[in-house]
Amino acid sequence: MFDFLFEYRGVIVGTIFVALIAAVIWAFFYGRKLIRTEKNDAVFGNPARALGGWHWVITGVSAILIVWLYFSWDAARAFHPKAANELCQVAKLSSAVNPIRSTFPLEKEFLKGTSLLVRENAQLSELEERVERLGFSETEKAKAKETIDLMRAAITGMTSPEYLDAETSSQFKSIEARIDDLTAKLADENYPGEPTTEQVAAAEKNARWGDSGNEIPNAPASPRGYKFDAAAKEMKSIASDFSKIRNKNENFLAQIEKLKAQIASLDELAQASPGVDELLVQNRADFVKGLTRVLRRVDDGNIFPPDALNNVQAALVKLDDEQKSQQGGLRFYDTFMMPGGQITSGSSSCSEQGSGRWLPKPSDTLRTFARISNPEIGYKGYPLLWYKMKPFGEMVDFVLPDFISSLVPGKFPRHDENGIVTPNFKSKVHDIVTGNFESFKVPMPSGHVWDSLLRVLAGLFFGIILGVPLGLFMGLSRFSKGFFDPMIELYRPVPPLAWAPLILTIFGIGDDGKIFLLFMVAFAIMVISARTGATGTHLSKIHAAHSLGATNRQILRKVILPNSLPEILTGIRIAIGVCWGTLVAAEMLAGTTGIGFVENVARKQSDYEIIWTTIIILGLLGLLFDLMMRWIIDKVIPWRGKG
Amino acid sequence: MKSIKKILSCISLAAVTGIATSTASADVNVAYFLEWATPNQVAKVEKVYDEALGEKVNWVNFATGTAMTEAMLSGDIDIAFSQGMTPFVNAVNANAPIKMVGIAVAYGAGGDCVVSDKSGISKENATELEGQSVAVPLNTMSDYELRLTLSSLDVDITKIKIVDQEPADAAVSLADGAVAMACGFGADSLSKMKEVGKPMLTLDEKTAAGITSFDIVSVTEKFIQENPEAVKTFMEVTSQANADFAKDQSKMDVIAKDAGLTLEKTKEQMAGFSFPSVEEQMAEYFNEDGKVAKVLPFMGNMFATEAAPAKDDYSSVIDTSFLK
């Protein structure tokens, strides 16, 4: 069923997206109309002004969904499912251009050569300053300075146009010509000609955008795609040739040779001088090392005369303009429909980056949700929420404590010579209390969601059962207020995660530790709310009950408890929210099952679809509980806020 | 109306400063682990990297390899030093544009699966593990080690109750007897585990079972394209630091201080590490059917998910050109 929905996800998502926008617009005008037609004389601050307004609920929910659909690029995919594939080819070209592009001040402030020059000169100046502190004799100093000057001259040798040899300039010319050629090809309608049979076959093999984990179909499949793909291949070879070009003019090479000799002799000098203290020798060695490092970088020959690359840059800009115009409407689609990131091309495949990556598409999330909801698949071999036939014996085992069998007199039977065990009364009792007997099976819910639910409910249950009486007691008795207050107030502000390491050693890896953690959270909230409720009872009501002859018990049950119910129920509502919030931390302790466990494992794999699925499940469960609590509050204390 | 204008201008200002800060970092940003002693920390402390690259090198410490990947994808980190294979494979499966350029650390004793003495299980009766609990940090190198260990001992992993725990917690559970076996890494956690148990396999047996653990150096593709010579220099300095360390280990205290470990722990940890030279990397790891070629597809399939299936070919994410 879901596969069928997924097949037509484009149409569905597109319709929903348009409908949502329409809903927001409609709700806006409806709201305006309502204000005009409604006679409302409620002043500012009157709660009646906040009543009603379900159309704003529609607006709010629609706005969230629109943002999600838009920023996850689900809307973009729905309206133009081929966009990613084409943009992938565009990304291939820009990735191929990148090695050349990054040397020019197109996105950066400076030409690469310029920043290299500045960097090397700065390091040389620093080295020059150091010369004074090395305890060199005058002649040695002069020699060191000469080396530095020579290095500067070598750099100048690279930047000066007169030394640039013909070969290098012709190499630049050929790069320029090749880029220009590529620009012309891009503009050509027929480039690169009919796709080969292999290309067509590859294009047919393409999955749809986001169909499999391979987010984006990689092989080109449209005329524009073929064009950019072919251009990218060509560009790759141009870029690789470009990065091989080195400034190796005669003059420069000669200078480098000279420098090498000079540094070697300086090194000898630094080592050979006897009677110098160790630190100074070390500093001199460092100085020579520093010089060598600069030399090795200068030796790369990556600096060229300032204007040598101008033509290449101009060609690149032309190429850029041409490829932009070739993209046509696609470019605007990318900008407006796929915000917050772009499609980048990696070595083996294209991928969505930015919000397209970490915000999974609603339709994909729904599919993942449907998939792991399938009890056959589940997550880590355990369903999300399903039922399991469990023998009745297991429940007996859970209820009856095992030590009952040890209370029965006698000994457990041993096996006899024939290897047969004859059960006696004691072992039969043992079988019953451990649930080890043939019994009928009952369906019981199981799964990650169920386990989490049980933990939260158990924690809440104990929190309420123990917290409410204690809170009431603290509100009524001086002793218990004074005695318990410091304890409660001391542990209450501690974040639950801080207890985690302790809980593991005390309770082990079972459910009890996780439940205890949740209990701790719920308990403090319940105590405080019950206490506030008890102290907030009107004295006149208690006096009235007294005058009518009520006993202490009756006053507690008939006056104080009903009066503190609003506070207690609000406390439960808050405790539920906090318990769900603590659950992820609790299940991080020793994860075996649970929604928190699913999220923790998915986090390590950056599996954002699963992560968002768990977030949505947690949110929905929290919302469900809250709605239930609201309903209970309405039924149990209808007088709330009206007294 | 005025307030709307104010908000708009605030947002645009924030956007502009955001752009300004993101383009301002021309330095080289390297991710590394604390408490993970490597010889290149000497070079890191002595600023050899900065001098050789001629740029400021920012070292940022991370707690997990997955976080390193995230930071690389957001553009905050260029080079991840000593990223684990598992997070790298997971990232590659998810189409992250990063590449492996070399081996940082090889460690046989870096991780272990320890069986508690109480359980009375050893590799002779390893199948008794079936039906018991085993603690392991899922989706890490330890997870990989656990699966290989169990399959080499013919234990059915589906019959074992796997408990997802960080190594430190796993050590506690092992001591409590809550689990029969715990797998983990890190000098502290492992020594605690070994107090109450013994490793399932010896180092030789692990090698025979094909369990080789190594951390890698990974670089974003963008950085490789734009600064190939910087990557080359980085690898050169690293291998020089490794070579220096092999000759002279007097600077152990520098490493210990930078790693945030005691001198003793550092020595202990580094005794279990090896730092393959460029030649060794090319001969043992990156050759045809070398360690990388074997482990990468294996792990890729092991950690493949519906959203991030294994690749047919992992060779395109390896770039050994910076080792030559």
Image: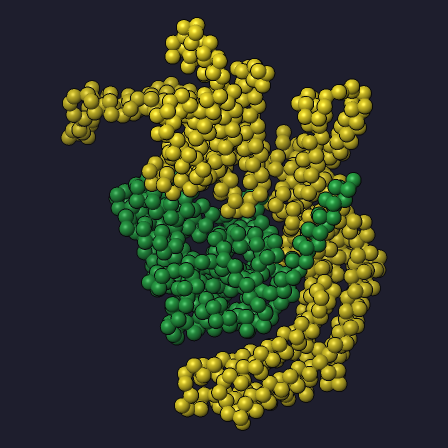
* Image location of residue B157, percent across then percent down: 40, 42
Q: Quadrant of the N terminus of chain B?
A: top right
Quarter of the picture holding the C terminus of chain B: bottom right
* Figure check: B323 above or below B220: below
| Residue B176: % across, % down | 30, 41
Q: Residue drawn 65% across and 65% down?
A: B226
Percent x, y of residue A124: 60, 80
Check the image and report above or below for A286 versus A43: below
Q: Is residue A247 visible?
A: yes
Q: Residue at x 72, y 23 (%)?
A: A43
Please indicate whether residue A108 sits to the left or right of residue A440 in the image. right
Question: Is A305 situated above or below B32?
Answer: below
- Indicate whether A249 appears above or below A490: below
Question: In this rendering, does residue A101 appear at all?
Answer: no
Badge count? 0
Residue sitting at x 49%, y 80%? A286
The colour scheme used here is by chain
Q: Colour of chain B?
A: green
Q: In front here: A517 or B11?
A: B11
Q: Is residue A367 left or right of residue A464?
A: right
**Rendered shade, chain A:** yellow
Q: Position of residue A65 (x, y in %)?
A: 68, 35
Q: Quadrant of residue A230?
A: bottom right
**Front-most of residues B25 and B125:** B25
